[in-house]
């Protein structure tokens, strides 16, 4: 009798696992909204791994520039990956590009997609308006994801009627090179949605990690306060920015010092993240504004992209 019971339990457990697995969404068709660096990078890695991808932005000019950037990136990758077989490299580029199309009308393409990944401007109102509109046209099974690095996923998900099929999918720049993806679960995100996104990230060759919907998720929550503390150390006159950068590279093994990284990321980007956190939690000492960073941003000295930030660039 005990043997029969064990067999029955094993059988039920097996069929439950199989049933759970069957319920997962196999993501084959992907729509990426936003043709900037992040959106184009996400579209590239999805197309390169055999997914059918539609990249959406507001104008054909933006999309032409995005597609050119993707093709250039693919050719650079192919040159390194297929050094001894250039023909195979050309085939890889051609096959990837054949999986990628573009559109200026998101509503017309989401009806047949499995996953919508949004990578547009970091503005809650704009993101909410986009998802609220797409929610009316997307198929019932379609999962929505935002690539936001600073906004609350729950606040975006609440603009739709599919909170259980909504999550954060935070890639890192440059997307083709960076292995990490943070998957953000809100209290409403279903296990089925989460597991489907984990599988999707793995098919992209990425390493997914899970985090609750907390400000900054994992990486930025640890990174931004570290960067701001480096600025405060300098503001107090405790050390020069050059010595702080050198100390963190040689003492902690970091590839870049905090001021070098701030200039690389863009001071406006870091300020935007910090301001958002400060607004949510004004009493948190980690989220207090930085006078010297605010001053540089006001002067349009945003880092490498403008030629000057904490350092000057030629």
Image (cartoon, rainbow, N blue to C red):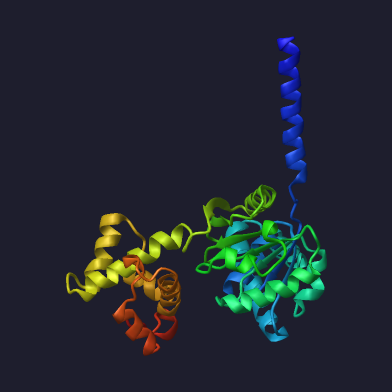
Quadrant of the snapshot with the N terminus: top right
As displayed, is residue 50 above or below residue 73? above
Q: Position of residue 136 (x, y in %)?
A: 78, 71
Quarter of the image where one finds residue 222? bottom left
Residue closest to the eye, 84 or 117: 117
**Is 4 rendered above or below residue 85?**
above
Q: Residue 279, position in %: x, y?
A: 43, 74
Asked whether 133 or 262 is in front, the reply is: 133
Question: Residue at horizontal 52%, vertical 54%?
Answer: 212
- Pinpoint residue 39: horizontal percent, then vertical percent: 62, 71
Q: Is residue 15 above or below residue 225?
A: above
Please identify the residue farthest to the bottom as the structure is shown: 299
Identify which residue is drawn at 34% across, 68% down. 283
Q: Is residue 36 left or right of residue 214?
A: right
Q: Nearer the viewer, residue 207 or 66?
A: 207
Residue 310 visible in the displayed image = no
Q: Is residue 166 visible?
A: yes
Quarter of the image with the C terminus is: bottom left
Residue at (71%, 11%) from the top-left corner?
2
Residue positioned 40% across, 82% down in the render: 302
Residue at the left extreme of this rendering:
238
Residue 230 to residue 186: above or below:
below
Residue 231: x and y, percent? 28, 72
Q: Nearer the viewer, residue 3 or 33?
A: 3
Q: Place residue 237 in its image quadrant.
A: bottom left
**Picture quarter containing residue 267?**
bottom left
């Amino acid at each position: 009798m005990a043997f029969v019971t064990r067999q029955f339990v094993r059988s039920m457990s097996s069929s439950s696992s199989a049933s759970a697995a069957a319920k997962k969404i196999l993501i084959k068709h992907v729509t990426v909204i936003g043709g900037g660096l992040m959106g184009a990078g996400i579209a590239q890695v999805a197309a390169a791994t055999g997914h059918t991808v539609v990249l959406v932005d507001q104008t054909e000019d933006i999309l032409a520039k995005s597609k050119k950037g993707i093709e250039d990136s693919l050719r650079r990758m192919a040159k390194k990956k297929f050094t001894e077989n250039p023909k195979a490299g050309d085939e890889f580029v051609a096959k990837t590009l054949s999986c990628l199309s573009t559109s200026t009308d998101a509503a017309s393409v989401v009806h047949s997609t499995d996953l919508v990944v949004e990578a547009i401007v970091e503005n809650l109102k704009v993101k909410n308006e986009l998802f609220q509109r797409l929610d009316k046209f997307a198929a019932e099974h379609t999962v929505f994801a935002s690539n936001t690095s600073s906004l609350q996923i729950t606040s975006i998900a609440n603009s739709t009627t599919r909170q259980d099929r909504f999550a954060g999918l935070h890639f890192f720049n440059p997307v083709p090179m960076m292995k990490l993806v943070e998957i953000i679960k809100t209290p409403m995100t279903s296990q089925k949605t989460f597991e489907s996104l984990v599988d999707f990230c793995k098919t992209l060759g990425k390493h997914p990690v899970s985090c609750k919907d907390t400000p900054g998720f994992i990486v930025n929550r640890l990174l931004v306060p570290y960067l701001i503390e480096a600025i405060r150390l300098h503001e107090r006159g405790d050390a020069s920015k050059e010595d702080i950068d050198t100390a963190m590279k040689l003492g902690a093994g970091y590839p870049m010092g905090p001021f070098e990284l701030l200039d690389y990321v863009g001071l406006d980007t870091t300020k935007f993240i910090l301001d958002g956190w400060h607004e949510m939690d004004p009493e948190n000492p980690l989220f207090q504004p930085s006078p010297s960073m605010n001053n540089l941003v006001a002067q349009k000295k945003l880092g490498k992209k403008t030629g000057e930030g904490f350092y000057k660039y030629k």
